[in-house]
Image (cartoon, rainbow, N blue to C red):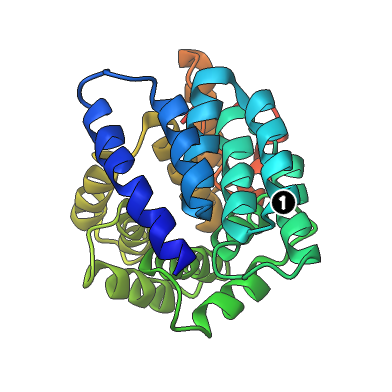
Amino acid sequence: MINFVRQLIAAPLRVLLWICGFVPLFDRLRLMQLIWAISTDPADAAGVLTLTASAKGIAQAHNRAEKMFATHPDSQIAATMGWLQIHHARNLPEASRWLKKARQVDCDDSALLSLELFLSEHLDEYDTQEVVERILARNDLPMSTTRDALLADGRRLLKEKRWTEAQAVADKILTVEENPQARWIGWVTAIINGNDALAQTQLSIAGGKMSDAALRGFVALGWLYMGDSERAARVLQEARTEGAGVGLINKDLARFLGGNFQETG
């Protein structure tokens, strides 16, 4: 009953916050802070942290998150702060610390799995396949989390040169939604099958929905998984010549890069 009353009081402020997204009548961060103070809803805390990071910087968001988590230990607060550390500072160890911090107080796992999956593809201390299996064994997670786990599994299958199984994963995703990473899997398998026309189509579709840096990263990773390290290196050399960034898709590409390139998109 108390929570219902809190949400009822906060409702007009939520409407005002939405309006301020189009017309800057009030400071959105201050308004979000007021909503959080009234509702104590973790989703509103996440909103405060997101706006703080954008307006005040990641350090202030971090300090605010520590105070919030001390009084309201919730997985959504920890997961949000972990993602903010990744997006604003590329600080994966700090994101990992937030994940572990939430696990130490037995926070609900659902909001943390997407973060853990991302970290597992970039930090050696995590086992990507183990995280993928935990996610795919559940049916109560957001569709986006399940999709990302399937994509990670598709990359594993490509690495193991299990082309048909990887394409089956891509097809499964594409029956539900258009996805550039699924198209990238299709590009790899089309090249393996000698279908250059299909490969070009798949890569063109993928490139239309990715940043240039991400596309370069996926193309290099694809050649790497196909066993053509020379062509993978050529993609990276072209990026260097053009002064362009390369997306660090996962640990495999990062090792191949040797830390010589910086992700920019």
Indicate the amino acid at tag 1.
Thr
Q: Where is 136 relative to 15, above or below?
A: below
Q: Where is 2 relative to 90, above or below?
A: below
Q: Residue at x 40, y 64 (%)?
A: 4
Which of the pair 47/142 is nearer the observer? 47
Residue pointed to by mark 1: 71
Which of the pair 220/14 is nearer the observer? 14
Measured from the top left, where is residue 31 in percent x and y? 41, 30
In this rendering, would 112 be left or right of 258?
left
Q: Where is 231 relative to 173, above or below?
A: above
Measured from the top left, where is residue 252 in percent x and y? 64, 51
Measured from the top left, where is residue 104 in percent x and y? 81, 64
Q: SS class of the residue under badge 1?
A: helix
Q: Residue at x 67, y 40 (%)?
A: 65
Measured from the top left, where is residue 18 in percent x and y? 26, 36
Q: Quadrant of residue 183?
A: bottom left
Q: Residue at x 49, y 68 (%)?
A: 149
Residue 227 seen by the camera: no
Which of the pair 12/115 is nearer the observer? 12
Q: Residue at x 43, y 43 (%)?
A: 219
In this rendering, would 163 be left or right of 262?
left
In this rendering, would 189 be left or right of 109?
left
